[in-house]
Image (spheres, helix red, strand yellow):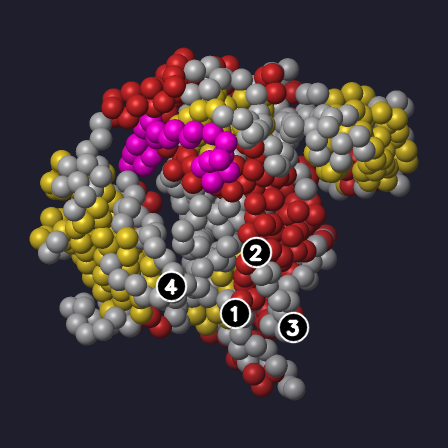
Amino acid sequence: MREPTPEEQAALTAGAAMWRTVSVPEANIPACTMADGPMGVASGRVDERDVSRLTPCPTALGASWDEALVARVGALVGGDAVRRGIDLILAPNINLARSPLAGRAFEYFSEDPWLTGLLGAAWIRGLQSTGTGAIAKHLVCNDSETDRDRMNAVVDERTLREVYLLPFELAAKAGCAGLLTAYNRLNGDWCAESRHVMTHICRQDWKFSGAFVSDWFGTHSTVGSLAGGLDLEMPGPARFLGPKSAGAIAAGDIQAARVRDAAAHVADMARRFTGAKASPLGTQQAEDLLVEASAAGFTLLKNDGDFLPLVPGRDRIVAVIGPNAASPCYQGGTFAKIAAKPDVISPIEAIRARYGDYATILFEPGVDPQPRLPAMPVLPARDIGDGCTRGMTIEYFASQDMAGDPVASETRDTNSLVWFVGVHDLGVFATAASIRASGLYTAAKSGPHRVYLGGTGAVRMLVDGVEVLRRDEEVAASDTMGKLKRGDADEAEIMLTAGRAVRIVVEFRYTPARVQGLWYGLRGPDSAQAMLSRAVDAARAADAVILVVGETSDSSVESKDRSDTHLAASQILLIEAVTKANPRTAIIANVGHAFDTSWDHRAPALMLTWYPGQEFGPALACVLAGDREPGGRLPVTIAAEEADYPAFSLKPDAQGDLHYADGMLIGYRGLHARNTVPRHAFGAGFGYARFTYTEAELTGSMSGGAAVSVMVRNVSDVEGSAVVQIYRDVPELTLIGFSKVHLSPGESRRAVIDLPRRRFETWRDGWHLIEAPLPVFVGTSSVNRQELPGSLMA
C-alpha cells in the first residue's frame, strides 16, 4: 500500500457525490456512503420497500433519561444502516432546545447540555457498535432555524464552552467518526471556517481525532475552510475544496501539511467504518425495542386520583377523541424525514385491539387532523408486490412524456415527497425526468371534496382521467427550498359519490440536478362544527375519554421556527368542549417540544408522548392499559408564560446577529435565577409506581471527583422506574448527574451517581474549580430537590 499523492490528498477533501466520499484504492482508502439521521436512516432511498425503522425523536429519547436504552436505539439505527449499505450517519443532533420556538427542537435531546451530551454519547456508542460511524451535528449553536445559513450567533466564551460545546465534547470523547459543522456563523466566523472551534478547542484541547465535515453546501471559501480546520466538504462534486485545495497550496495560501492532515482524517474515517459490520436486529426484536423506547419517553405530568391506567377488565365505554388518534405526528418535517414501514398501526387501531374484548370504543377526530395539507387516504393503484395496502403507487420515468414502462416503482403512504435529484449517484432519481403517483379513493360521504396539489416542477392532477388541477411552470432554483418549506398548494372542488371508487393520478415533470418536492391532499365534505359536535356527543356517552391532541409533521420543520407555543386554536376549543362534556378525560399530547399547557387544569391526566416513532400506537395502548408505565421525565422546561422562557425570540437583529443574551441561564437555570416557577419543571414526571429515597450520601471532592449514593425503594405494587437527579446551584443551578433505576414492586437498590471533576469546573480563561464548599442536591426535578448532608470541598 502506498501513500496518497498530493493530488489524491486534495481530492479526498471533497465528496465524490451527494452521499459518497472519494476513494483511492491504491492507497487502501475506500469510499464511504453516508445518510442523514437521527430518527433512522434517511436519504439515499431508492425504493419504499427499503424502508428504515422510525425511532422516537431525540426529545422523546431525552425524556427517557436512560443511557442504556438510548444506546440500544442507536444500535438499532446502526443495524438499519448496515442493512442498507450505509457507512456513516449524520447524527445525533446534539444542539440544545434553547427556545421552545426552535423548528428542529424535536431533534434535540434536551435543553440541558449534560443530559444531551451523555445521551448523545450513548447513541453514538450504540450506533458505532455496529460498525457504522456517527457524524454528530451541528457544530455549533445551530439551535434555531431562522436565517440559519446567514445568522451570526453571538456567544461569550464561558457559555460557549460550558453549555453549547459540552455535548460535542462528550461526543468527541465517545469517539464519534466526525463532527458536522453548522451553516451559521459563530462570533463572526462561518462555523465551517471557525479555527477557534475546530482547531483550538476540538483538536488541541479535546484531542479530537475524527473528521470535520461540512453540512451540505455549507462551505464558503477554499482558504477559510482549510485554514479553519475543515477536512471534508460535502456534498460532491467539489465546490471549494477537492482540486481547489491543491490550487490553494500552489498559490501559497495553504500549507501542504494542512491538506495532507485533512486527507488523513478522511482516510482514517473511511478505513475505520467500511470494515466489519454487525448483524441488524430482527423485525420483532426491533419493533419490541421501539415500543419500549416510545413508552420510556412518555411523560406523565398529571394523574389526579390515579386516573391512569385505564385497566381493561370490565365493561365500559371509552371515547377516543382527537385528530392525533388516527393521524398522529410520528416525526417532524426535515430533509432527514424517514421512509417508515407501510401500514403503521395508529393509536386508535392499537387501542381498539387492546380494549376491544373489554370495552366499547367510540372514536371521533373532533377537528381536521391536517388543517394545512390534508392526507391522501387512498389504496395503491396497482400491486407491486411490496405488501403495502395504503398509499399512492409512485412510478419513475426516464422521460418527461412518461412513455414506456417506469424505471422503478414504490408505494408511499404520505402526502409529501422530497427527492435530492440529480446531484448524487442513485440512478433512478438522477435519470428520471417525470413521476406519476396514483391511487384509488372511495368517498365515505357524497358531496363536494377539495383536492390539493403543489410541487417544485410542472404538476397536474386527474380524477378518473379528468384534469382538475394543473401548474406548468417549474420553480426557480432560488425558491426551491422555500417552496418545500411552505408547501404551497393549489386547490379545486370535485363532486364524489359515497361508495364509488375514483382513480386519482398526479403527474410531476421536472428538470434534474435540483432538490424536488411534490405534495397533494384530499379533504372530505365534513364541517368543523359537525366534527366538534360528534366529538362532544361521544364524550358525553363515555365512561372515560382519551383525548389525543397534538401537531402535524409540518408543525416542526427544518429551516423554519415557530411563531408561538400554542396548539392550534381548533384543538384548544376541542379540549375545552370535551372536558366540559366529560371531565373524566386523559389528555395525550403528541407534541415534539416545550409548548403551552395552560389548559391542563381541565383534565385529571396529562401525558406527553413527543414524536414517538413508528410504534406509537402499540406503545400508547400498552401504557393506557397499564401493561407498561410511562417512563419519561421532562427534558425541557414548560414555562407558565411565554415571557418566562430565558430565550424565546429567535429572530436575528438587523445586522444578522442573534445574541445569546441568556448566557449560562438556559432553560431551567434562567427560571431559577429569576425565582420564576415553571408550569412543569425540568426533570418532572412520574409513572405508575411510587418510590422513596433514603440513606443519601455524598463522598469525594471536587478536584478528585465525587459520588452521590441513595437507596431507592419501589413502594408500590407495580414495576416502574425512578430517575435520581443531582444538582448544584453555584454559580448557577446545574444538573451534574442522574441515574434511571428500574425496580420491581417492593424492590430496593442503591443508586450510585459518579460526578467527575468537570462537573465542578467553570471557564475563566481556563478551567477552574468552583469555590468551595459546594452544596449538592438530590431530587426528582429542578424544583423538587433537597440538599444533601455535607458539602464538597476542593
Where disc 2 sits, the SS reads helix
Q: Residue at x 22, y 48 (%)?
A: 441
Q: Quadrant of residue 526?
A: top left
Where disc 3 sits, the SS reads loop
Q: Are marks 2 and 1 in contact (CB under 8 Å)?
A: no
Vertical side of 634 occupied by 543: above or below? above
Q: Is 357 inside the magenta-drawn segment? A: yes
Where disc 4 sits, the SS reads loop
Q: Amino acid at mark 3?
A: Ala
Per the image, the residue denoted by label 4 is: 386
Which residues lie in the magenta part? 350-372
Tell me how far mark 3 sits from mark 4, CA to CA: 30 Å
Per the image, the residue denoted by label 1 is: 85
Q: Is tag 3's residue or tag 1's residue first in the polypeptide sequence?
A: 1
**What is the number of the mark on residue 276?**
3
Q: Amino acid at mark 1?
A: Gly
Q: Are marks 3 and 4 in contact (CB under 8 Å)?
A: no
Residue 79 percent across, percent down from the top left: 58, 62
Q: Is tag 2's residue or tag 1's residue first in the polypeptide sequence?
A: 1
Q: Residue at x 48, y 69 (%)?
A: 20
Could you say which is closer to the camera, residue 718 or residue 145? 718
Q: Residue at x 48, y 47 (%)?
A: 614
Per the image, the residue denoted by label 2 is: 284
